[in-house]
Amino acid sequence: MTDAVRYLVDNGIKWWAMPADFPPWPRVYAFFARWRDAGLAAELHERLRGRPRGEGRSVEPSAVVVDRQSVKADATVALVSRGYDAGKKINGRKRHVLTDTLGLLLAVLVTPASTTDRDAARILLPAAKKHFRRLARFWADGGYTGHLTARPHQLRTRPPGGPGRRFSARLRPRRAPATNG
């Protein structure tokens, strides 16, 4: 059953497209749903995420990278959960992804594409800060500037240096691509 779920996640297939080598898809889905409802899937993710970090590093990250991706949504997707991203000219949703410096997934937030990056970060970062106590720094592109960094008192945490230090937001500007000519 574990191999069947891993195969599904790795290949991004639909449940009903499970190869014949595995048990019938309704049975695999029933096991997965039971694991998900019991919190086993989240616990397994946490344990696996901590393994590579445990090699000479603290299990909890102290720095994260936040970025987003706009994705087109079909007309069957409810209007409440989709919007228009004017910058990328996409009608759909945005995935806001938070990873540690090794690229390991920490959190994902899906919003309508019309949601600004700053507004999504104001939801995603404090939630991550509550879960990862060592979190002291994040990297983001220019879309996350503005009132997010203008109010650092809302993002305070207890960084590794000790109590009393503030959450530091270091934003790096995008570099223009090199042109020939």
Image: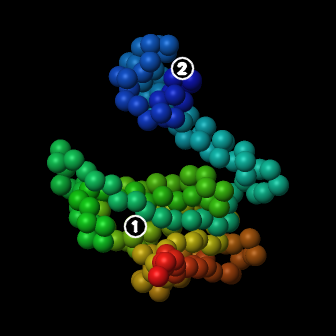
The answer to which quarter of the image holds residue 14 is: top left
Q: Secondary structure at mark 2?
A: loop
Work out whether mark 1 precedes mark 2 in sequence or the reverse, and give the earlier one.
Answer: 2
Residue identified by numbered label 1: 120
Local crowd at mark 2 within 10 Å, few (<14), some, or many (≥20)? some
Q: Indicate the colouring scheme.
A: rainbow
Q: Residue at x 61, y 52 (%)?
A: 104
Q: Nearer the viewer, residue 52 or 19?
A: 19
Amino acid at dot 1: Ala
Vertical position of residue 12 compared to residue 95: above or below? above
Residue 99 is situated, as x and y percent measured from the top left of the image, at 57, 58
Q: Is residue 28 visible?
A: yes
Q: Secondary structure at mark 1?
A: helix
Q: Which mark is residue 97?
A: none
Residue identified by numbered label 2: 1
Q: Residue at x 60, y 65 (%)?
A: 64
Residue 18 is situated, as x and y percent measured from the top left of the image, at 42, 21
